[in-house]
Image: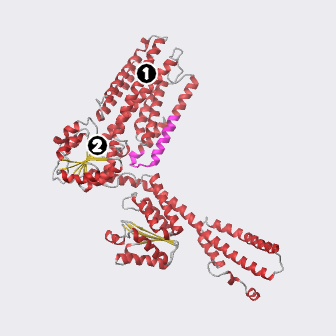
Amino acid sequence: MSIALVGFNHRTAPVELRERLAWRDHEVAGVVEDIVARGGSGAVLLSTCNRVEFYVADPTAEALRRVWERAGERLGTAPQAYGYCKADREAVRHLFRVAAGLDSLVLGESQIQGQVRRALELSRPRAGMVLERLFQLALRAGGRVRAETTLGSGAASVPSASVDLARKIFGALEGRRAMVLGTGEMAELALACLADEGVRCVLVAHRHVERAREMAERLGARAIGFDDAWPLFSEVDIVICSTAAPHAVVTRERVGEAVARRHGRPLCLLDIAVPRDVAPDVGELEAVFLYDIDDLQGVVEWSLASREFEVGDAERIVAEEVGAFWEWYRGRRMVDAIRALREHLEAVRRAEVERALRKFRHLDPGDRERIEYLTKVLLNKFLHGPTTRLRHAAGNGREEAIAEAVRYLFGLGEAPAETLRTEGERDDS
Amino acid sequence: MALYGGTAAVAAVPLLRSQRGLRVRRATAVLAVLAAAAHFVALLVFAAVYRVLPLVGLGPTLATLAFMVALLGVGLLLQTREPAVMLVTVPLAVGPLGLAVVAGFEAPSAGASSGAWFLLHAAASLFGLALLGVAVGAAALYLGQHRVLKERQFGVIFQFFPPLEQLDRLNLRALVVGFPILTVGIALAVVFAGRALEPVATLRYHVGWGFFAWAVFGGLALARAKGWLWGRAAARVSLLGFGMIAGTFLVLRLAFGSLRFL
């Protein structure tokens, strides 16, 4: 096994277990260090609200055992029932799908891209070359999916649905003005999404002005009472209603005149309160586009359903990037084997040349150099064919078996050059 | 025409399958550009064969008008990046082009209008009318988008049609820019008529229809520029105005087809 993944996500572990497993940023380096110390060339810990995943390169059995132990310590129970294990190409494919948003709770969500990047940054001192490259290519796969498909487009939440609706009415939202009625949390979330698109909140209205003041100060807006709000329906472009009123506060009688003064300029009215703040007949006014919480949810559902059509293209991109990583990885393993072989044979050559030159003390420096040169040329000649074939093997899927065979045949990484001398040669020295 | 049809078919794919797809956008843009290019080449061939710009005779004139509408549509497609734009542009281009094919592309007669004044008049008038076509296309899309937004139907039209205000702005700009261009065309016609070899009386249907189109177009442009019309009312009146202009042309052509008309 060259790359191992041990993970827990929203499909395998309920939230009460996932919240116990979640590691904070300052804990990641210590956990990664602990795992790599048990064996492996690198490790990365990805910890988000919906998943915790350990990626380990060239893991030993002890390193994997330690991963499960750490998870078990956090969970307070046997973790195997809630986790999953993947290896090699499957582990790579899994990570690439995660970065692309294909494995997310909300298909195509983009937050995971930043979380994968953050995981690599936090684990970096001990990530190792293989996982560094793996995560970089995973981020590239995620970027390609978002650039080449519309998997991440459209609203995925009620607050972001307000942006979709406003955009369909106004087009670009830069410079548009919004008013908030009430100080509900959902209204603030919707406003935050709109503010990201350039909408300015200019007014916060509440039955009691002093309650509006705190939110208004936070948003850089003006606090007003409800009675002052109705005439201003002619000035703003977007109104978000989220009061705690038990009945409709925005009625045709109150805002009809102001809406008429708009001379056809559209007004986007987002009523996210339950019970609703806006009387339904307000939506019948020509310039008014009225949406309640069910409508916003409808936008989200449609958007998420349409993302399903992009999955095929996204999976194709992931498969391409997995292939690119695996191509690199196979080549790298063969490069390691070739380097180890050269180093080993070079060590043998040096040792034998030194031993021979000790016997031939009568040779002048020029002759010694010629012998040195001759042995180097011979070594290169002998290695040329096998090296070329080893590189070729990296491209035809036999690299693992051949690299192992080379290591075994030449004892790479085991015995020093001394042990390869024959009995007669040992007697000579 | 096949390329135009293919463009509209590809543009309709998202509406049929609820699939966004960047490939659909790219494919629509490529086909639209190819169709306009093929159309342009065809007009060039006409000019090369008959040694006259395709602004003389009913068939060539309608074909040129169709090309201008298509060209403006391609520009809109590239600007808005919404394939749905081609769903109205293609019919507005294929309609006159189909009529041109029916009318035929025979060689201009010996007494046919020619000369720089005439060609400038024809080009300016056609371009002005092409912009009217764009205004009407925007109005049609506006009404579609307005309905789904008002009735809270978040389906394919909501997703794939351009934003409401963008369409309203497009209608306004096309009318306000197109009308002066058409006015220049009319003014050039007056200059041309003063130099023409045949009396204007034989072209009374042409002239009458031209002034009628100019008046309707002008009324629309004025109402929009002054802010008397906006939103859904502006879109409806734009469609009505276009219907009046196109309908009058067709009626005159059918009723008095034996007389010289363009």
Give the residue at x 71% y 78%: A348
Residue placed under numbered mark 2 in the picture: A237
Give the residue at x 50% y 21%: B119
Position of B153 relative to A304 (above/below): above
Q: Position of residue B108 (x, y in %)?
A: 53, 19
Report the chain holding disc 2. A
Residue A95 visible in rendering: yes
Of A177 and B59, nearer the camera is: A177
Total tally of numbered discs in the picture: 2
For label 2, count other residues whose C-alpha is less than 10 Å away and answer few (under 14), some (14-19) or many (20+). many
Residues in magenta, as a range? B13-37
Position of A190 relative to B237 (above/below): below
Q: Position of residue B242 (x, y in %)?
A: 36, 28
Taking the image as shown, residue A266 lies to the left or right of residue A355, namely left
Residue placed under numbered mark 1 in the picture: B184
Task: Name the dominant secondary structure of the magenta segment.
Answer: helix
Q: Secondary structure at mark 2?
A: loop
Residue B17 in magenta stretch: yes
Of A281 and A261, nearer the camera is: A261
Residue A105 in magenta stretch: no
What amino acid type is highlighted by mark number 1? Answer: Val
Q: Position of residue A246 (x, y in %)?
A: 15, 53
Q: Secondary structure at mark 1?
A: helix
Of B220 and A395, nearer the camera is: B220
Taking the image as shown, residue A429 lies to the left or right of residue B74, namely right
